[in-house]
Amino acid sequence: MARRGKRGRQTKARRRHINWGRLLMSAALLAGVVAVVVLVINLLTPPKGDEDNIFTGLFGGKPTPTPTIGVEVLPGATGTPAPTPTPRMAQTIALSPAEGTDPSAFGFNTQLMIDRQEVSSFTRSGDMRFGSGDEYTSLKGIITFGGNNYRNTFTYGTQTLEKKTLERIWEIPISSLDGWTGVGWTGMPIIVEWPEETRKILGIKDEFKQKDGFVEVIYPTLDGNIYFIELESGKQTRDPLKLGVVTKGTASLDPRGYPLLYTGQGISSTEKDGSTGAWFRIINLITNEVIARFGGKDPFSYRAWQAYDSSILVNAATDTIIAPGENGVLYTLKLNSSYDPAAGTVSVSPGNLEKYKYTGTGYGGSADDNSKRWVGIENSVSVFRNYVYFTDNGGRMQCVDLNTLELQFVVDVTDDSDTSPVLEEDPANGTYYLYTANEVDKQEGAATLGVGKSYHRKIDGRTGAIIWQVEWEASIGSTSSNGGTLSTPHVGRGKLKDIVIYNSTIVPVTYIDENGQQKSGNGGRIVAYNKHDGTELWRYEQAGGYWSSPVVVYDKEGNGYLIQCDRSGRMRIHDPLDGGKVLFDLDMGSRIEATPAVFGDYLVVGTRGTNGSGEGPKIVGVKIN
């Protein structure tokens, strides 16, 4: 109180002797400070309707939003430093084809059909361009073969793996159609956690419509049905959708979250109207009905056989799907789709197909003519920005520009290849790579000798140059199964970042059987390489062959563990950092050709039901402990 009074008296005294010059100077300084503060506030406050420009002008440019896909926020993690941003490749990459990759060197000839007319050139309306694999979708789950346009993952989220064991927790018996039983190659299920606004309007049973965190498994199979299952319980969420046609490949969901399912037919059929062929189908998951299809028996194709095993991709920006056929035609199709969650409706009104076909030196004949290569795309294509990559039944890898449908370069991959090329970015060197392999089918001498060469390769995606390759002997097999590599490799991340894992079937192996006896003969092999130079790190050999792709699950610390299914009906956990050591072995009851999908600590896969154990074909839910 004394100080306050004293200060008051001093102020009152000073008022008797005002220094006007000093006062005016102070006022001017104060006005200047206020002006600067106002300027800063104006610069930091975005104009109405332009919130993204918050730092424009003051710091030159606007910030890049932090990606949320694949980022897990742990309880109590407030104040945790943000992870180091992953380096990104440029949106536009110029190709530089290597010597020996010119299409003319292979006698390639391509033709286009646009809007039902054959044309000499094409320019797409709207730029078709994809981002990196982890940008393909914001949906939670595995929604296409290999997860995205890089085909580099069969798992969503991280796994706990405390015990490193596997447990069968539910199963759904399935049947057969025209002699095709269970689930075949590639046969990966779709697993998705539906957003709330979509879940409430789906054509699912009422008990699931209000269930938060509802995760659905969607599984087209060889018996002509599509099955719908709740992931954790194994309860069927809808009645099976009876397509009545064999599905060998893997379906795809729309990455935009539209309740649309895309699925290809694996074996030609005769429809009620008498038409013969195979079709891609688009299914409305609100009404559970087929709303569009294309394919049939395309007279534009060079090959009479019509089938669609590939898992399609959707380009959101152009509302267009990419769908290759075993008839040797690459299709793109504008969907003209519409989705209104509030009204509970989704629709498509497809335009005319854009078609690309090819032939080359040595192509022709039929599937029974071992002296000829033949056109046909069975693998699921991979896409880097505007370039689509695929291998074919004739042993060639092609790179095609999606905006012009022009062939950019061709790589000789020796023989028929069903492996989906896996893409990997290398931002430091301004390029990206493709990992691929071949089986033994049409190569010279294989039909006479009964054996040929299967190669595991790493290829530069910008140039087509082969970085490294490893040669293996493999059997030509039989009419139902070729030897070599039919599956898709895994390119490691986390603590496996320097490893790539391949597997093979019907290859000469030596192994120790269950009685401790050394055996040899044709069987399966898993091999891990140093992905930089192709040096072999370890191999695992056994009696059962591998069609199912290697699936690697990762814990929160980045430790990776391989889960591998085989044709003898086993599912094993291997430790890739300990020489491929088997940590757990689970009997699945019958042979497995399909590739599993993993969501959190749950795995789903279908079986064929044709080994000696007596178990029929089924879809099995497995808990990863």
Image: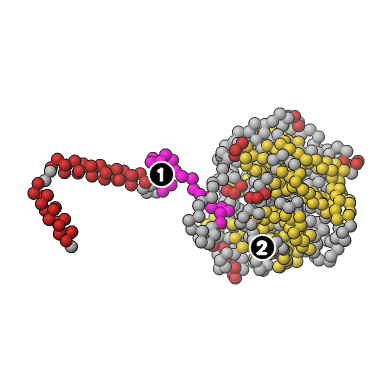
Q: Is residue 298 left or right of residue 193?
A: right
Residue 361 rendering spot, x and y as whole percentages: 79, 33
- Label 2 sits on a secondary structure element that is loop
Residue 6: name its quadrant: bottom left
Residue that mark 2 sits on: 162
Residue that mark 1 sits on: 55
Which residues make up the magenta segment? 50-72
For marks 1 and 2, the one nearer the N-term is 1
From the image, give the main secondary structure of the stretch colored magenta: loop
Q: Amino acid at mark 1?
A: Phe
Note whether 266 is above or below 606 in the view shown: above
User: Which residue does the image show at 33% across and 47% down from the upper left?
Assistant: 41
Q: CA distance from mark 1 to mark 2?
A: 45 Å
Asked if residue 68 is among those painted magenta in the image, a careful observer would answer yes
Camera-side residue of 243 and 83 = 83
Query: Residue most toward the bottom?
Result: 207
